[in-house]
């Protein structure tokens, strides 16, 4: 089964807002073996909406439309949908009741503009109203067309609970698709492409995709088969081959990340971690603590931006900073040992560097970073030179440091 | 002048990667008064690419194409462009030379797959080759069509340095557009819509856009006029009216953010800040240190996940935690005073809470957060209850805490 996604909103074509719905929906659809052939983004413009709907219905087996169902003046999708379906827009009392109830429950004030949310094209079936907006769907030329709001959280809820199950029921000839994503750090896209030459084979239903996803490069392996057994067996075989070729640059798979993997290892081994960050400014801690349950193994972090804080909190000797500088192997090592010692953890991780865009010198240009890891064996330091913006240097440093912890 | 953007890549329609180029390009074009009418995303599929190009050229004054110019097997845009333009694909020796030189300079190994990057349709004009990929453009039916790579950093560079200036030279009847974006925190979209009723007026060329951008809601004011003077004068007037209606919920404007505004205030007043984070896990520090020059006013932060670290680093009395709990007004106040005192800064900011999804109790359910601010006047604490995922609770807490610092 194949279909397309249409996202509507002046904010999207003007670039004011980055669409988050098309990506979510296409990910979910792909994982179910349903193919998305096109994503079209257009403004709050009746002619453009109708033209795009017309074209989509002619060439697709389903259409998902997001956006323009909100309460403000610029939300016109329901009205245009009624025009496209050639039926009047009517007030649905049940939806109105639900919205009033839901606002009350969430402790939000009632605003008359919300009444607009209860108008839907006559004959359209409602998709479980939830929160401030609800969706609806209808058949046009036997093609199901789903209209959803633009708020990502609402789209996710409505898609997962209603739209995807409905779509599957419309899909009679579904092939079995299995996909694995390998997340690579430390190899360029072209290098990965060379290493994987010959693995993909469209004739046998094996696809390899390459996706830069800073700071990682992701490789997807997709296998299409007639049965679950075949698909899973063949995927495993190809995955092994890919792993052999890309080892040791694979840092995570599928939904896992470096930080979730670190969590697993720490819990399994009963280890605890503490971090001393200078140039990463809290990003490492933010990533580690994004994992639920991280309080079990993450003891503390310090973001030591000033020299004083390095001396006070981590017992870095003032002379070390004076002689070698705050950005030096010696300071990094002392920071890692300091944080490990004061927090009494198994591992102490430290970063210090020049994130830029200012602050560089000839000897230590912007992007110079020292990362240090202290454990019961002692302390190791490595010097790096990253290029890019302030944000990119922070991201590359955090990624490299976390990857070091992962590899132990 | 109006045109459209086409982004190409299986990774985009399958949802594996979120496109970052269309958004960047449309933002830049909009700011120059050039209208983007549609963004189409399609896969690495020759028929789909040619069909989409055909349609775009018929209805638009320019077309920007991104993606599929890379070195791997799945990159087919150059080949399809040649087919579309009905001319052969040829090896450009100059480009090849440049790529070899550039790889060497960046210390990257040469991979034969890179040779593919030097093939362009005959007759196309090159867009300044830079890095691993270069772009090209040509006229089709007198409509300029620009082909750019998919790597966001390369697109940005090529667009800013070459494509946008070229587009302006094609644009004879440009209206003057001025836009202001107000970033709102603490009001729902419908509430903002009601407060701003009557301000927009399409007939007079004034547009108000509403864009949820978690955790903020953004409001854009767009004014189209014949002269710069008119546009700027009218924008200022409308902006004042909008400000009057939305005060005090405006947290930033245009490219500024809460953290850049905090930076300005800290520098102007000569103040310094230190942060003690528990449930935000480093996110506040990460946001503050994302601003270049933040080392001038950001002294340090501690991420005190364990009780021990709260006691050790911040001198929070053990009894306070024992009696009131780590998530309590008393602990938050003690953390804020502790971080201010040990870092000897003007302001001490602290957060403690239950980010979830586990760890909630009846009295303190998931989302319960205490934020405290200490300054020379003393310490203030407030209790909040945020809803959402772990990530959303972290984001809402960081945003609320930073907004507090901003408002002083």
Image: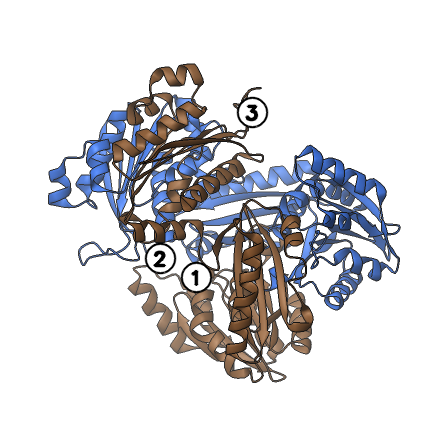
Chain colours: A blue, B brown
Out of A55 and A300, give the one closest to the viewer.
A300
- Nearest to the observer: residue B158 or residue A128: A128
Disc 2 element: loop
Q: Quadrant of the C terminus of chain A?
A: top left
* Between discs 1 and 3, the one toward the N terminus: 1
Q: CA distance from mark 2 to mark 3?
A: 42 Å
Q: CA distance from mark 1 to mark 3?
A: 43 Å
Q: Which residue is mark 1?
A: B153
Q: Secondary structure at mark 3?
A: loop
Front in this rendered view, residue A150 or B23: A150
The residue positioned 26% from the left and 31% from the top of the image is B342
Which corner quadrant of the image does residue A189 belong to?
bottom left
Question: Taking A219 as reference, is A138 left or right?
Answer: right
Residue B199 horizontal/vertical position (percent)? 64, 62
Q: Position of residue B35 (x, y in %)?
A: 60, 71
Mark 3 burial class by Cα count in 10 Å: few <14, some 14-19, many 20+: some
């Amino acid at each position: 089964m194949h279909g397309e996604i249409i996202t509507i909103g002046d904010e999207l074509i003007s670039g004011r807002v980055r669409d988050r719905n098309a990506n979510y929906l296409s990910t979910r659809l792909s994982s179910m073996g349903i193919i998305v052939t096109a994503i079209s983004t257009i403004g709050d413009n009746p002619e453009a909406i109708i033209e795009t709907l017309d074209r989509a219905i002619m060439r697709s087996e389903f259409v998902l439309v997001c956006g323009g169902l909100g309460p403000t003046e610029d939300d016109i999708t329901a009205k245009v949908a009624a025009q496209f379906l050639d039926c009047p827009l009517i007030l649905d009392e049940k939806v109105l009741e639900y919205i009033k109830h839901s606002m009350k429950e969430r402790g939000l004030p009632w605003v008359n503009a919300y009444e607009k949310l209860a108008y839907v094209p006559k004959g359209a079936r409602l998709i479980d109203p939830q929160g401030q907006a609800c969706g609806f769907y209808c058949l046009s030329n036997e093609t199901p067309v789903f209209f959803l709001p633009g708020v990502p959280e609402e789209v996710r809820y409505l898609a997962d609970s209603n739209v995807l199950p409905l779509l599957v029921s419309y899909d009679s000839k579904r092939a079995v698709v299995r996909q694995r994503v390998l997340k690579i750090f430390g190899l360029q896209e072209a290098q990965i492409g060379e290493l994987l030459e010959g693995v993909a084979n469209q004739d046998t239903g094996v696809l390899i995709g390459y996706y830069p996803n800073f700071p990682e490069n992701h490789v997807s392996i997709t296998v299409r088969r007639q049965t679950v057994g075949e698909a899973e067996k063949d995927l495993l075989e190809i995955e092994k081959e890919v792993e052999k070729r890309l080892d040791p640059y694979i840092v995570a798979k599928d939904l896992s990340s470096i930080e979730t993997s670190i969590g697993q290892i720490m819990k399994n081994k009963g280890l605890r971690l503490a971090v001393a960050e200078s140039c990463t400014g809290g990003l490492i801690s933010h990533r580690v603590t994004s994992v639920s349950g991280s309080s079990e193994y993450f003891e503390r972090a310090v973001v030591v931006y000033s020299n004083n804080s390095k001396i006070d909190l981590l017992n870095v000797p003032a002379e070390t900073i004076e002689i070698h500088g705050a950005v030096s192997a010696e300071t990094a090592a002392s920071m890692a040992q300091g944080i490990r010692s004061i927090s009494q953890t198994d591992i102490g991780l430290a970063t210090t560097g020049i994130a830029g865009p200012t602050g560089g010198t000839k000897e230590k240009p912007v992007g110079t970073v020292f990362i240090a890891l202290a454990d019961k064996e002692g302390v190791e330091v490595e010097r790096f030179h990253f290029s890019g913006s302030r944000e990119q240097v922070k991201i590359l440093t955090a990624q490299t440091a976390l990857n070091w912890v992962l590899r132990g």
